[in-house]
Amino acid sequence: MCGIIGYTGQEPAKDILINGLKQLEYRGYDSAGIAVLDPKTGIVLKKKTGKVEELAKAASEDSTDATCGIGHTRWATHGGVTEANAHPHRQGNVTICHNGIIENYKELTTEYGLKNSLKSETDTEVVAALLDKFYEGNPFKTIKKVVDLLAGSFALCIIFDDQPGKIFAIRNVSPMVAASFEGGSIIASDLTAVINFSKKYFVVPEYHVLELSQEGIKVQDLKGRTVEPEILEVNWDITSAQKGGYPHYMLKEINEQPEAIERTVSPRVSDGLPYLEEDGIDDEVLANLKDIVIVACGTAMHAGMVGKSLIETKLRIPVTVEIASEFRYKDPIIDSSTLTIVVSQSGETIDTLEALRLAKQKGSKVLSIVNVKGSTIARESDYVLYTHAGPEIAVASTKAYTVQIAAMYIFAARLGLVKGVMSEDEAREFMARLSGVGELMQKTIEASDDIRRIANHIKNAPDVFYIGRGIDYTLSLEASLKLKEISYIHSEAYAAGELKHGTIALIAEQVPVIAIATEEHVYAKVISNVREVKSRGAYVILICPEGKVENKEVCDKQIFIPQVDSTFGVFATAVILQLIAYYTSDAKGLDVDKPRNLAKSVTVE
Ligand code: M6R
């Protein structure tokens, strides 16, 4: 959470930092700030509560052409949303931006007698105070000394007043990438803020001190040895991280799903069969696994539930899905016969990362399904199956979710082949159908007018319920999360047969119930559950396959998905559910891409 950036070069830094913060804003947006080091006048610091736009307006009054500076967009953890708590923080001759949490900041405040000098309630300012306290002209030595004292996670960008044109940086856990280019260097929490300057970058190694200058970036480990980081190249450009004519990133990302699925699936099909050799996933690990545990958070965890449904139904291999924040504290029953699959768009979610580390400690091999190349989770996993969604900027995850499901389907098909529970013909047919889901999603996207009308109808409802059975229940959970997240409407998802065990008491006149009924073998059962709520006054929206026309006694509105096996229908159904949430939020005039209290990457536990 929080986005940080540092730039040093030949151009005025102010606008570069603000534009970079706009790219990083999805990581946190309750306040923002920048500090530039003007060699003539010293540090110019500007902070504002609210979104980066507020900062941009305030900073437009400052005329500085300083070419070195740092910036921050905040998601508050320690201390409320105030200008004093916004970053950068300045103590003496040191100015810093920080992403992460310093767990022992209170102890350090007491031990080093810092209390009276602190102007904010943040953990970050304590780090600034320590850097200032120990600084004797050698940034490397000072940084090393201070990070030795810190417990917790941090990505720090630091400016010392007497080091013009230089930014120092160090990180533990919290992500940072950096790049040097003709005439300058840049560092940021993620690539979206770097890519305008260079497509070649490196992931900042943990506990290494970086010195950025116009000439390039020096990287040293804590023993002072110079290190050459591995240079990576990004395969998308800045237009992929812009709105491209759409009113919101979320709508753009919903529309991008057919292509994202194609990019994720097609490289993994060889001679019509699922193929994971290029990803370095050897068949041996699949052959030996006895069970699978899928660990993730939020939407990624919901994608895991769809994976479980497929693997258990088609392959009869036991799968458990665990919420990462629970898994990491419960002494899970896993060993070397368990394959742990961690799922994460960002590859930086702290609970998922810690769950991965625990699984490895227990002897389990870890396969991660990750979207961001080179992210911490990807680097620490034994195997990585990258999804190719491209950058996902909207806080509400859409395309990352469906490609995670697609990646799990490819994995399942390969596993089925290796285990001998799927014949080659079956695996070929499976992959052919998977390759066709993009087209079904496209058709669904094109027919979204009805969905917009339905969203208008539910926008004023205080509560919305989703019900479904089997795979449709897992989709309901995700649909409900999406609606809550961006429309602020209270919503719950229920296994359709479970509603009458309590929750049905909440169904009254006109309460919207969105019923998902795409599985043929339980279709009639879901329809009986629908009748139960309809007869109690609910306003029912039924999502079901084409051809299943129901009368007014059953539902008020119907949305049809193409007639396919529900295993593959999930992709089109997911699009409908995403669009319901999107149009509802938009109809309410809310900030769809940056819902309140949230941030894209959850790097605190
Ligand atoms: O980056 P990750 O996939 O690990 O993120 C996990 C969740 O924080 C994320 O899916 C979250 O639930 C979404 N913003 C919901 O739309």
Image (cartoon, helix red, strand yellow):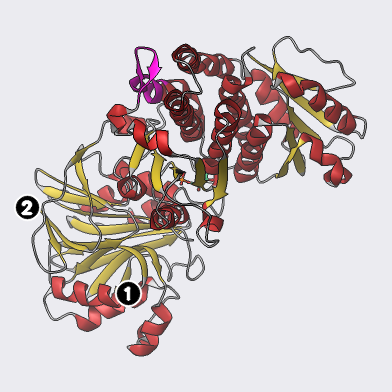
**Residue 103: percent from left, percent from top:** 42, 73
What's the residue at 18%, 58% (across, down)?
Answer: 66
Q: Amino acid at mark 2?
A: Glu
Residue 268 falls within the magenta-colored stretch: yes
Amino acid type for the residue under numbered disc 1:
Leu
Residue that badge 1 annotates: 150
Residue 368 visible to an observer of this rendering = yes
Magenta stretch: includes residue 322:
no
Query: Image check: 596 left or right of 275?
Result: right
Report if the beta carbon of the residue with label 1 is closer than 8 angstroms to ligand 1: no
Q: Secondary structure at mark 1?
A: loop
111 or 474, which is in the foreground?
Answer: 474
* Label disc, if present, on residue 458 of the rendered structure: none
> On the rendered image, what quadrant is the N terminus found in?
bottom left
Residue holding disc 2: 215
Q: Which residues are magenta?
A: 262-275
